[in-house]
Image: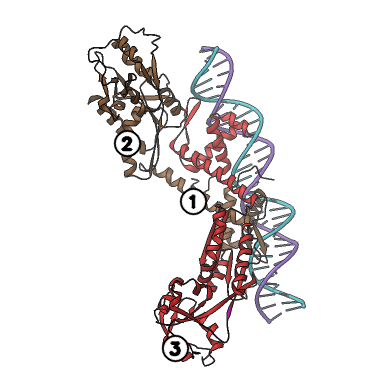
Chain colours: A red, B brown, C purple, D cyan
Amino acid sequence: MYAETMLNSLWLKTFVKLTETGHFTQTGNQLGMTQPGVSQHLKKLEQQIGAPLITRIGKGFELTREGELLLGFALTAEKQETDLRAAIQQDDPNTGEIRIACSGSMALYLYPKLLKQQRAHPGLLLKVEVAPNHRSLRLLQSNEVDLCIVTQQTVQSSLTQHHIGNEPLCLVVPADFEEKPSTFADLEALGFIDHPDGQHYAERLLTPNFPEINAVNADLRATGYINQLSQILVPVAQGLGYTVLPETAVRSFEAQEKIRILELKEPVSDPLYLTVKKHRTLAARYDWFSKQIADLCGQMSSS
Amino acid sequence: MYAETMLNSLWLKTFVKLTETGHFTQTGNQLGMTQPGVSQHLKKLEQQIGAPLITRIGKGFELTREGELLLGFALTAEKQETDLRAAIQQDDPNTGEIRIACSGSMALYLYPKLLKQQRAHPGLLLKVEVAPNHRSLRLLQSNEVDLCIVTQQTVQSSLTQHHIGNEPLCLVVPADFEEKPSTFADLEALGFIDHPDGQHYAERLLTPNFPEINAVNADLRATGYINQLSQILVPVAQGLGYTVLPETAVRSFEAQEKIRILELKEPVSDPLYLTVKKHRTLAARYDWFSKQIADLCGQMSSS
DNA sequence: TTTTATGATAATTTAATGTTATGTATGCTG
DNA sequence: CAGCATACATAACATTAAATTATCATAAAA
C-alpha cells in the first residue's frame, strides 16, 4: 500500500495523456517513452490510489469513477503549476498579497490611502494586521507579514529599519475641561481612558510634561478601557476621562467639538520605523507600497 | 534546465517540512531520511524552479520570493491531494456533478424536478445539456455527460439502454383551426413551424395519420423556425402555422387558450431510453437521479 | 482461422535517489 | 581570539526505482 506516498506527478502526466489518446502506444510515443513504461506508470498510479483507474474493454478502455476524479485532479494540478511558474517568472508589481502590520492609528491613516492602489490593480490584495509594536515584530519574524511599522528601534539584527516620520501624540480631554495650564493632579482627578497602547503613549507624552509624575511606576487612575481605536474617544467626549493618542487617531474622531487637544510645553512624537527583514527580497509590488508609506508618514509629521 | 519536467511532489514535501522546522537535520529525521538527502531535494527543486528558494543567513535561512510562492503552491497541492483521496474513498451520493443530456422537452419536464435534489444537497451540481438524440449520444461517448435520454435505440454495443417511458407527440394547431377531421392538405395550407427536432417529430406522428404523405421525402412547407423550445408555439398561437411537439412541451406553453391539440386516429409516442455506457460504473449520486428519471418518465406516459 | 495490432509481462540496463564519510563555515565559549 | 560544537555542503558509493528490449497473450479484422 502506497497510501502514505504522494502522487507522482510524472505518472499523472502520463495518465492525462493516456486519457487524451486512448492508446498506450501513442501515449508512449508522444511522451518520448515506450509502451511498457506507460503500462507501468498506470499500474503504479493504481497502486497509489488503491483502485483501478480504467476498465479495459477489449482493446480500448473507459475511465472508472476513480479515474475520472484523478483526471480532474491532474488537470487542475497541471494548470496550477503553470500558474506558479508564470508567477515566479513575472514578479508582477500589480498582483499578489501585500501583508503589513502596524498600529491601529497608522492603519486608520494609511489603510484608505493604500487601498487606492488595490482598486487600481484588482490583482493586488492588501492585508493589514493591526497590532502593537512587539506583536508586529513577531509577525514579521514569523513571516506572517512582510513589512511592519513600529515606533521603536529593535535590537534584532535580522531586521532593517528606516525612520520614515513621526507621529505626534496628543493629550485629549473633554471640550469643557479647564483652559488654564493643567497639573497632573487635574488629570488624575478626571481619570485615564486606557486602550491597548494607552500606557505606552501616556508615559511617552506625560513624563516630560509633568515632572511631578514618579517616572518609573506611573500608575494612572483608569476610568475606562476599550480596544477599538475608533471608540476610545467616546468616553472622553462624554467627560469621563482623558487619554493620549496619536494625532491621526484623534483627527478621525467624529465629534471633534466635544473633545479638545491640550497644548503642551514639550510636544512628543513617536518615531515611525518602516521595518523589514534584512535578508529577504520583497516582491516588486512592495516597492510602491514602501515608498507610499514613507511619503505618507513623512507628510504626517511635517504638516 | 528542468523547466520541462513537472515539480516532484516528494521534493515539495521535503521543502514544506524544511520551512516548518527551519533545520535540514530535523527535517531529515522527521521524514525518515538523512540530512544530505534534504540538501539534495532542495537543490533539485531549485534547479526545477530555476531560482534559489532560500537565502542562507549564517546557519539559518529565509525564504526567497520564489520560495514563498512555491511554499504556497505546495501547501494547496497537499490539501487538494487530501481532498481527492477523501473523494475517492467516500463516493458520497450527495456531492459532485451530475451530467445529463436530453431533448429540450425532456429538460423542460425533468430539470425543475431534479433540481429539488440539488437544493436538498448543496454539494450536488446538476448539469443538463439540451441536445438532439445524435448529439446526446456523442456527448455520452466522449464522456462529456454520464447519462442521456434519447428516443432511439442505438446500434452502438458500448451503450446500455433502458426503456423508461413514452413521450406522446402532439399535433398542435392555432385555437381557431377547423374542428372537423383535417386532411394533410389543410395542414400544408397552414404551414409548418419547424424546430431542431421538428422534422423528426413530424414524420413520426404524421406519416401513420395521413397516408397521403409520400413517406420517404416528406418535405413540409415550413413557415417558421426557432430553436428555443419555449417559443416554438408562439407563431402557432398567432395562427402562423402548425407544429409537432412532445406533450410536455405543449403543456408548458403559457397561452394554452390560443392553441389546440388535434386528436388523431393513430396516437404516436416516442419511446424514451435512459442510456449509459455499458462499461462505466457511475458514481453513487447517479442512483437517485437514474431512478427519479425513470419514475418521472413512467408517470408521464401513463397519465 | 489467420493475421495484425495492441497491451501485459519478464529480464535487463540505465538512471535516480539515498547514505556514509568527510569537508567547510558559522557561532558560541572560555 | 582560539578552539570547539553545530549545521549544512559535497563527493563517492550503495541502493532502489524506472525505462527499455524482448517476448507473450489477447482481441479485433480480414
Crowding around mark 2 (Cα neighbors within 10 Å: few <14, some 14 to 19, many 20+) is: few
Q: How many marks?
A: 3
Q: Gap between marks 2 and 3, in whole Å?
A: 72 Å
> Which residue occupies 33% across, 43% down?
B119
The quadrant of the picture occupied by the N terminus of chain B is top right
Q: Amino acid at mark 3?
A: Glu
Marks 2 & 1 on one chain: yes
Marks 2 & 3, CB-CB < 8 Å contact: no
Q: Secondary structure at mark 1?
A: helix
The residue tagged 3 is A188
Q: Is residue A52 magenta?
A: no
The residue tagged 2 is B112
User: Subunit of mark 3?
Assistant: A
The residue tagged 1 is B79
User: Subunit of mark 1?
Assistant: B
> Which residue occupies 52% across, 61% down?
A127
- Locate residue B186 relative to residue A153 in the image: left or right: left
Question: What x and y, as percent, mark residue A145?
Answer: 56, 64
The answer to whether any part of residue B31 appears in the image is no
Residue D3 in the image: above or below residue B262: below
**Residue stretch rendered in magenta on the structure:** A264-269
Q: Amino acid at mark 2?
A: Pro
Observer-nearest of B202 and A219: B202
> Which residue occupies 25% across, 26% down?
B257
Q: Amino acid at mark 1?
A: Lys
- Which mark is in front, 2 or 3? 3
Question: What x and y, as percent, mark residue C21?
Answer: 70, 59
